Image (tube, rainbow, N blue to C red):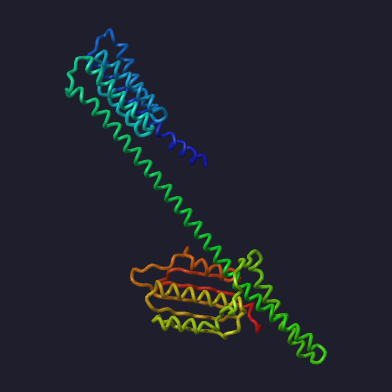
Amino acid sequence: MRGVRLGETARAGSPWLLDGLLCSGLLGLALALLAEGTVEWDEGTGAVALASAVLACAPVALRRRFPAPAALVSLSGCVMAGAVSAFQTPLQLALTVLLYTTASRSGRGVRAAVGTGAVVTLTAMDLAWGAVLFSPSVLWWPMSVAAAMSVGYSVRVHRERLADSQDRARRAEEQREEEARRRVAEERLRIARELHDVVAHNLTLVNVQAEVAAHLLRSDPDAAEQALGHVRRGSRSVLSEMSALLSVVRADGEEDPTAPAPGLDQFPELLRTFTEAGFEVDYRVSGSPVPLGPGTGLVAYRLLQEALTNAHKHGAGTATVCLAYGAARLSLEVRNPLHPGGTAPSPSGLGTIGMRERVTAIGGTLETGQVEDGYRVYAAVPLENRGNS
């Protein structure tokens, strides 16, 4: 943890370190030129030349925090250097860097004021010391200032556009996540409604069998005992289904469905709709089929329906469906080849999320993913809800 924090501190302080190195380099070069006599200046004005070099170059170290004031201080140093004929390239470079920073970090009014002030001051300085109007030396200052300010402004616009693009991308991602959460919540509610219908059906049967048992209790005890057995199995099934409905309620104003919930006994009809659409399905069943509870049958039916729909959409026109009945679990597997260069269903897609929610709601497991021969959907669901209710 300490190494990470030190690394973060170094990265955070690196811009200031670079500015300090740039300031030191420009100031050192300016002082070296003064010491070697490369710049012509009177020995009596040496202190002014030295002070002007410091004023022009030192503000570079503070250019990120105080861009406009630093540029104005550097401009005053350049004017002082010109007054004693000690103006040199390092001072001009320092001023150019500060004008660029001002344009890239300041508002429109500050940019206009600093840029205009630099052009007027430098041009007036050159004219005051004998330059001819419209000479190259005089025209150089407006051009150099305009170039530095233009580059800085372009960098500022690029940063703002990049930040705006990142902000839009972030908001779009948040909207997509919110939409996905909303769709998942709607899917969960729809699943709960279907399970609710199953529970209501079982409770109706329990009520009927209880009335039969009460009617036959004295005249036919054996038949009454059989009816009570149906009540017991139906009650057990209801308790199992209700575990998935503790925090979900039906939406207000929605009409109650009149058709029973589908199960595996309706799967041949579903299979026929796919084959009539030109989709070839190889359907295999192993083990001894047993009656499924309404909740398990509904989940199995919906899972096969979604898996075959994805296979039809993303596959190469064929699929294999395998149902394996075990002692306590039913295994369902759907495999299909993919188109050459085709894409498999997204693991975060709403269809896959819906299948996972259904299977998990009844205590099952789901595996989806791409395999060597295409795409595979595999689910294992418990059979403890099977019965004759």
Q: Which is more toward the observer, 56 or 40? A: 56
In the displayed orientation, state which residue is furthest to the bottom.
219
Q: Position of residue 290 (x, y in %)?
A: 60, 84
The image shows a total of numbered marks equal to: 0
- Answer with left or right where residue 337 lies relative to residue 139: right
In the displayed orientation, state which residue is furthest to the front.
253
- Answer with left or right where residue 277 lies relative to residue 47: right
Q: Position of residue 139 (x, y in %)?
A: 20, 25
Residue plotted at (61% across, 73% down): 195
Q: Position of residue 334 (x, y in %)?
A: 47, 76
Q: Position of residue 302 (x, y in %)?
A: 53, 75
Q: Quadrant of residue 329?
A: bottom right
- Answer with left or right where residue 320 lies relative to residue 189: left
Q: Quadrant of residue 82?
A: top left
In the displayed orientation, state which residue is furthest to the right.
218
In the displayed orientation, state which residue is furthest to the top.
44
Q: Which is more toward the observer, 119 or 292? A: 119
Residue plotted at (24% across, 9% down): 42
Residue plotted at (24% across, 27% down): 142
Position of residue 116 relative to residue 206, above or below, is above
Q: Which is more toward the observer, 133 or 358? A: 133
The quadrant of the rendering that contains the C terminus is: bottom right
